[in-house]
Amino acid sequence: MELLGRPEQYTDEDIGSGEKGFSELLEHEKEELLQDQSDEDGKDNGGLQRIGAKSLSKKRRCTSENGSSNGKRIRKKQLVLNYYEDEDELMDEMERDTEIAFMIKSKTRKRGSPGRGRINRSSSVDSGVKDESKNTISYTSSSSPPSSPSSSVSVLRWERGRCTSRHRKNNGDVCFKCHQCMQESKTIVSCSKCKTNTYCIRCIKEWYPHMKVQDVKEFCPFCRQNCNCNACLHSTGMIKTSKRDLSDYEKTQHLTHLILSVLPFLKEFSDEQKEEIKIEANIQRESPSNIIIEQTLCFNDERVYCNHCATSIVDLHRSCPDPTCKYELCLSCCREIRQGSLLNRTEVKFQYRNRGCEYIHGGDPSRECSSVQAPDNHIEPLTGWNANDDNSITCAPKEMGGCGERKLALKRILPCDWIANLEAKAKTVIDICETKNCTFKHEYGETRTDMLRKAASREDSCDNYLYCPDSWDTLKEGGLLHFRKHWINGEPVIVQNVLEQANGLSWEPMVMWRALSENMDPNSTSQFSEVKTIDCLAGCEVEINTRQFFEGYTEGRMYGNSWPEMLKLKDWPPSDAFENLLPRHCDEFISALPFQEYTDPRAGLLNLAVKLPPGVLKPDMGPKTYIAYGLVEELGRGDSVTKLHCDMSDAVNILTHTAEIKLGDEQKSAISDLKKLHRAQDERELRNWVNSQSGRSGSQIGDDEIIEKNYNREFKVPEDHAEGPTLSGSPCMEAVDETGGGALWDIFRREDVPKLEAYLKKHVKEFRHTYCSLVERVIHPIHDQSFYLTVDHKRKLKEEFGIEPWTFVQSLGEAVFIPAGCPHQVRNLKSCTKVAVDFVSPENVHECLRLTKDFRQLPKNHRAREDKLEIKKMILYAVDHAVKDLEALVATQV
């Protein structure tokens, strides 16, 4: 870059040194500057000694892995000296002598030495860099410090809604402020494009490590729309989040596809209601057409749930007429009561106990911890609540929350026959589109081999490769059709380089934390000084200072015995309003989303989740941020993982930032020794458990034989994971470094779920959960989220049941699409910041409904039981919205 006082601008004659050469003068001035700095350090030494203890206690600022300031306070002169003393660093960005010449100019003005000569004020000055004699405009920052003590006049004005500032010193010179930090600096770089915003070199180094100073001069972060100053981070609407403008014909095709995909489920809802109306007609001995169903009062900002299964109620249901009871039952539970198949959903207890720190690290449990009787996993069908002879249903018994006396009456929430009428309207508009030849054409074409990534080695299978296009390919014609070709088959999709579609806003956790802290009300900011994290080893919640957590994100943390401490933040910031707390990051994330017709959480044309009308209570679909530590080596216990689970809806997850934590030789040796203790503890406890089961009879002995057989085949935790996540053709660890991989994903096919569940039940005692205790109870192997399959478990899974997941490494800037109904797990190979959003695609509505049915069978206090998605309500409103839009589009087409 170019700084003030380039050699070709300031000659020996300009400086007034006829006998000295320019280079000699520069060297002389450098020695004086160094001497001045030494004198100032001597004067300040006493003060530093007085505050030394306080300074040492401060936490070092967490910066990006590319390098930045360490957060110490640096005087302005010292800042300049630091930059030109580090010659290797400056050669890439500036000429060393020019900055010294800039300091000569500053000193000459300050001293006014007659023997030194003066800078010619008429000399040409590079327009790209401002000095004290020039004016500039800078946007204010919400974290702006007060004016410098040396300023006597502060001039503030608003231009186009943006605050600009300049400070006039006593000698008449104007001092400029950095747009980022709003502090005065002598090394200010001005943007040659907007000619308004300026950034100091220190802020460029600290907050934009990926940019060179010359880049800022040509096109500043504000013009690039990736400025991360506090004022910009709190702004919204600065960028266009949508990447494609759809034509009316494309909209017609997409809406037709949506309606055709979900119309069968709409018909299913309509038929279910018609059947219940017939039953009610028999109870009242009337014709179905004469049945009058009373409408129950329901506000838009509330959800109606079944009192027994906790599934959301959309329209028809049965309710107790007793005003003091108000027990409500969904149609599914009514059907199960009449069939005698209603399950008992009483609460269950998971009795994990803290056996002490030594036990967690492979030692013996503490004496205070007594053994606990294993809980019974069997859930009996509910007895004593049956339908009457005429198929009417009496309110639930008092012990179940009802009155047990009055018959439940049929009630509705929506207008009469609303669903049946909607079904008829949907069929009519589809017929019109087919007549006008507006139906969607499925012309996929062949997928190029360079867009495929091998993720499995299943025999006699054609789905070992995953669709993996570049983000630019997703914008091309036919890109969405290729995505749908794989998506409709329930296959995950990986999209590379999605951050290139955004504007380059920093996703470093400290940047987000700074924006979040500044955005909060002063009375509530204290809640962000501490964060609640999950300790992956104990599986329990830990509160930690926010700055300490982020320091560990880049530098790592360990226990006293050198075992790595893995912490993770989930659903951070701690609020549903990610868009309100981090508006600029929310816009940046949406702009990076591929296939926005599906994924856009605001206006995705094929996203059923955005079709709910204003005022209706909506589910929290994200975006959400997941920040967690990570390590390449698989520890086998306490890894930074998201355990095996299955989401209710589709999801897309983008890896936005990584930081690598490297272990020293001493720590590696300690880890190896602790792994041996873990292995011995595993074998000892498995043997004890098998012996404790030997007294049981009947079918349970068969389970013991299975466990004993498994024990005899040398149950073990792999001692050496140097090979990394290599399994059946999945990427090896050499590829992790080459691609910047940050997270290891395992995603299972839907058709393999029964075998996966059978494996987990068979090997349940080989897994550990809370407090590193053996898994004590299994309600549902996947929905419990108690299991993570290591490399060894995945190998045994394929040997015994012939199935394997898609296994791949997610690299920085890659988006992973996870279809609803596909169990998956994730392990961080580095410290990772991921941002994810849920969506509901027409192709996977059937899986959302299936999962809703599975969840309603879980016990009352199960973590996955609540119907937070309300998929039935989403389907109804999505069809209604799409029919209205399609009718308007068809009317405009000739």
Image (cartoon, grey):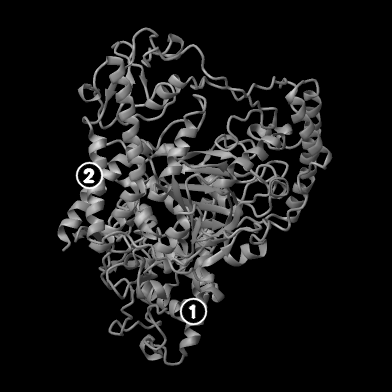
Image position of 681 (left or right of 94): right
Instruction: Please tell me how many numbered marks the rendered image carries.
Output: 2
Where does label 2 land, which residue?
A: 425
The correct choice, above or below, for 842 with respect to 596 in the image is above
Task: Assess disc 2: are there few (<14), some (14-19) or many (≥20) residues with their C-alpha within 10 Å of its C-alpha.
Answer: some
Image position of 66 (left or right of 883): right
User: What is the x, y in percent for residue 894?
Assistant: 16, 63
The correct choice, above or below, for 262 with respect to 85 in the image is above
Nearest the viewer among 658 and 489 is 489
User: What is the x, y in percent for residue 354?
Assistant: 66, 27
Nearest the viewer among 617 and 178 is 617
Image position of 881 (left or right of 465): left
Asked which secondary structure carries label 2, the reply is helix
User: What is the x, y in percent for residue 243?
Assistant: 33, 63
Q: Residue at x 39, y 24 (%)?
A: 306
Amino acid identity at mark 1 = Arg
Residue at the far top: name it: 405
Q: Nearer the viewer, mark 2 or mark 1?
A: 2
Nearest the viewer among 364 and 297 is 297
Where does label 1 land, which residue?
A: 96
Q: Quadrant of the N terminus?
A: bottom left
User: What is the x, y in percent for residue 563?
Assistant: 70, 44
Query: Toward which corner of the image does residue 617 lie, by quadrant?
Result: top left
Image position of 883 (left or right of 542): left
Contact, CB < 8 Å: mark 2 with mark 1?
Answer: no
Amino acid identity at mark 2 = Lys
Point out which mark residue 293 bears.
none
Nearest the viewer among 546 and 598 is 598
Residue 522 visible, this angle: no
Q: Residue at x 20, y 22 (%)?
A: 290
Task: Assess disc 1: are there few (<14), some (14-19) or many (≥20) residues with their C-alpha within 10 Å of its C-alpha.
Answer: some
Q: Residue at x 51, y 17 (%)?
A: 382
